[in-house]
């Protein structure tokens, strides 16, 4: 069953979830986190950095696994998701480099890299808290709508809409966005002990409503979260516009 929490602004969502993560790390310092990229989690990362600088959150024993990475980009490429994470979080908190895991977009053998990532998650004991974003078309990670979904970490072809949504990382040129990416699969995501999906902005309202109220379908990958026993959706007022829920200040 999905539980919804709705806040007035995207910044309020980020602040609240940052406090939730900080409490989790205090109670369980060796927590394994699944982390997203994109515009939606930036307020979360900004607040986590602030809390760390204030001495209120310690990442020294935490482990992270990012959801996805563009195919063909090296780790040092400023357009990569690794660079994004360094800029917004990793370079500003005390995460151990050896506990940071991001798929290698430049790996020659995508299948082998995917299998290696799955084994690394297994060795870490699984993901305790998976934080997700939501694509306008209902994708999570880079699990795109289609006739079927791949269960585990894999190489996937990106839709034109997803490439347009990521154009800001590539000089606002959708044509420059890689056509493929590596991504955790839906089964990998659903094996997390707890899932929190973030969605902000009016452009996400339709997908949010379909995710919560519609059928489970590969045409809307996020709908599979209905099958997870411990899923929460954290929304701002705009993203919750098509739902009948109470707004938290």
Image (tube, grey):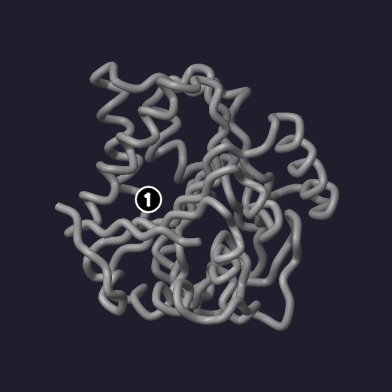
Looking at the image, residue 89 lies above or below residue 240? above
Residue that numbered label 1 is attached to: 41
Apparent side of residue 132 relative to residue 57 in the rendered image (left or right) = right
Apparent side of residue 46 relative to residue 9 in the rendered image (left or right) = right
Specify the quadrant of the image occupied by residue 34. top right
Looking at the image, residue 111 lies above or below residue 122? below
Q: Residue at x 45, y 45 (%)?
A: 84
Residue 100 in the image, given as x and y percentages of width and height: 58, 31
Residue 154 in the image, given as x and y percentages of width and height: 75, 58
Q: Nearer the viewer, residue 144 or 167?
A: 144
The furthest residue to the left: 249
Q: Residue at x 27, y 21 (%)?
A: 53
Specify the quadrant of the image occupied by residue 186. bottom right
Q: Residue at x 39, y 24 (%)?
A: 93
Q: Residue at x 17, y 59 (%)?
A: 8
Looking at the image, residue 109 lies above or below residue 205? above
Q: Nearer the viewer, residue 190 or 101?
A: 190
Element under label 1?
Answer: loop
Apparent side of residue 73 relative to residue 210 in the rendered image (left or right) = right
């Amino acid at each position: 069953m999905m539980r919804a929490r709705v806040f007035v602004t995207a910044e309020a969502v980020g602040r609240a979830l940052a406090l939730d993560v900080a409490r989790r790390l205090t109670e369980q310092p060796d927590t394994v986190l699944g982390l997203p990229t994109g515009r939606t989690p930036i307020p979360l990362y900004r607040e986590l950095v602030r809390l760390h600088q204030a001495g209120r959150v310690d990442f020294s024993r935490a482990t992270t696994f990012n959801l996805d990475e563009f195919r063909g980009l090296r780790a040092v490429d400023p357009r990569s998701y690794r660079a994004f994470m360094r800029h917004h979080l990793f370079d500003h908190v005390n995460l151990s480099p050896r506990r940071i895991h991001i798929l290698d977009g430049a790996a020659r053998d995508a299948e082998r890299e995917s299998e290696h990532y799955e084994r690394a998650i297994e060795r870490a004991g699984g993901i305790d808290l998976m934080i997700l974003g939501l694509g306008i078309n209902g994708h999570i990670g880079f699990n795109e709508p289609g006739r079927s979904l791949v269960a585990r970490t894999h190489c996937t072809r990106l839709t034109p809409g997803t490439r347009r949504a990521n154009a800001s990382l590539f000089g606002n040129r959708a044509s420059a966005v890689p056509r493929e990416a590596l991504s955790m699969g839906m089964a990998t995501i659903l094996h997390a002990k707890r899932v929190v999906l973030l969605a902000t902005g009016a452009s996400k309202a339709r997908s949010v409503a379909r995710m919560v109220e519609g059928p489970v379908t590969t045409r809307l990958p996020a709908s599979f979260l209905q099958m997870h026993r411990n899923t929460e959706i954290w929304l701002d007022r705009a993203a919750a516009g098509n739902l009948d829920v109470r707004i938290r200040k």
